Amino acid sequence: MPITIKDVAARAGVSVATVSKILNHHPGISEETTRRVEQVMRELEYAPNSRAASLARRATRNIIYLTSLPADIAYTNPHMFDILCGVQSALSEKGYTLTIMDTCREEVPGSTAEQIILQKLADGMIVHGAAIDKNISALLVRRKFPHILIGHPGDGSRLCWVDTNQILGGQIAAEHLLERGYRNIGFLTEGTTDEIAYLRLRGFRIAMQEAGVPVREDWILHTTADLEGSYHAAFGLLSMQQRPDAVICGSNLLAFGLYQVAAKQGLNIPEEMALITFDRYPYSTVLDPLPTFVQIDVHDLGRTAGAMMLRVLKRPELLAQTYATLPRLVCNATTPYRP
């Protein structure tokens, strides 16, 4: 039996009229009562009948793009923009619009996604990896809501997802340095909880192990995803008494920081230290010498996500899971053959 407004009222210990007023944002209801009723609605997965029914009668022709990143990253990062452009290009060809919803500042984590799913406020949802959690994942699967996650949710997941093989990207970077004769290789990475950073570092470890080259743990430095963090990590690495002769920067922001600190310390890249990073934008094109980097076509990743969304809308039972857009090496001036 579907959950009704009476069920919500009974569980919350209020009248049906009170629940109705909260649903319609009527003034005069205390914050405590409002929070209690909203919590019960989430627990019961209640969707207001009138709105849900009206939306069920017609397709919205709209897809939600759910993200949870600070504004300075979500709307200025070229990667995010390229992903969005790729998604939109695929959806627009079939007459769908794309609405961006940022959950970074929501008071109740996951409430935006829950509302969209339970009230069917869109035909489907494309979720950036930073916006997903266990509760949203479970709700998407349980409600069979059309979705595509950009990012890998982990083995055994019942989510539909598309991702770039970040492990392969880390392997490509390490293998390139190994082929050029480097053995003492360091790695600068963004934190211990960032999934992309973790997977790239994992790929590095796999390549080193397969080559029989030991990894120096003190040459693996974790930092924050900002300029200050990149400077701090670079300074820590370059100040070591015994430092690596090559370094992989998990992002070109970290490469930018390393360039700046190296210049201040009079260290020549690549004569004294080879360097490889990831992605062309936003910093790789302004660094001198031009760094070698592993490139990922995120526009294609977004377009693939949009195309998969359309497939799932046609076949809701489809479990769409795939890797797309294989990383490729762009060899430039910072990885010469080791003498």
Image: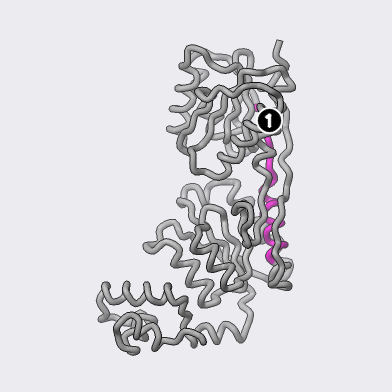
Which quarter of the picture shows residue 320?
bottom right
Percent position of residue 265, x then y:
48, 15
**What secondary structure do most residues of the magenta stretch adopt?**
helix
Percent position of residue 62, x then y:
61, 71
Q: What residue is rendered at 59% in x and 35% in y?
A: 201
Residue 60 drawn above or below residue 318: below
Percent position of residue 239, x then y:
46, 16
Residue 184 appears in the figure: yes
Q: What residue is rendered at 71% in x and 68% in y?
A: 318
Q: What residue is rendered at 61% in x and 18% in y?
A: 184
Q: What residue is rendered at 44% in x and 33% in y?
A: 229
Residue 24 drawn above or below residue 89: below
Pick the residue in front: 197 or 319: 319
Percent position of residue 56, x then y:
59, 83
Q: Mark 1 sits on what residue?
A: 207
Task: Say few, some or many: other residues with alpha carbon within 10 Å of mark 1 (under 14 / 14 to 19 / 20 or more).
Answer: many
Judged left or right of residue 166, residue 34 is left
- Quarter of the rendering occupied by the C terminus: top right
Amino acid type of the residue tagged 1 in the rendering: Ala
- Read off the magenta span: 291-309
Judged left or right of residue 268, residue 261 is left
Judged left or right of residue 138, residue 10 is left
